Amino acid sequence: MALWPIILAVTLKFALLVLISLFQLFEKNGRFSLPDEC
């Protein structure tokens, strides 16, 4: 099937965007450190 490479590429791009946004969010919160308010 010729659809598989397209689906795979779209999924990888989406996952990459999500990972980048998550990394930025964690960096904004203090570089992967847990909040001290627990």
Image: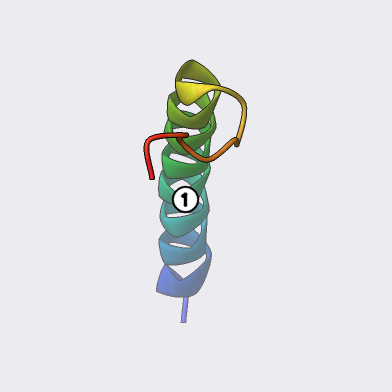
**Position of residue 35 measured from the top left corner of the image (x, y, whole percent):** 45, 35
Amino acid, disc 1: Ala
Q: The C terminus appears in which quarter of the rendering?
A: top left
As drawn, 5 above or below 23:
below
As drawn, 27 above or below 38:
above
In this image, 10 relative to 8: left or right? left
The answer to which of 2 and 26 lies nearer the viewer is: 26
**Position of residue 37 measured from the top left corner of the image (x, y, whole percent):** 37, 36
**Position of residue 2 measured from the top left corner of the image (x, y, whole percent):** 47, 72
Disc 1 residue crowd, few under 14, some 14–19, many 20+, Cα 10 Å:
few
Residue at 47% from the left image edge and 17% from the top image edge: 28
Q: Pick out the residue farthest to the top.
A: 28
Q: In this figure, which residue is indicated by the disc labeled 1?
A: 15
Residue at 53% from the left image edge and 64% from the top image edge: 5
**Secondary element at image label 1:** helix
As drawn, 16 above or below 20:
below
As drawn, 3 above or below 18:
below
The answer to which of 25 and 15 lies nearer the viewer is: 25
Residue at 46% from the left image edge and 23% from the top image edge: 29
How many badges with numbers are in the image? 1
The answer to which of 10 and 26 lies nearer the viewer is: 26
**Toward which corner of the image does residue 3 lie, by quadrant?**
bottom left
Q: How is the image coloured?
A: rainbow
**Position of residue 7 measured from the top left corner of the image (x, y, whole percent):** 41, 64
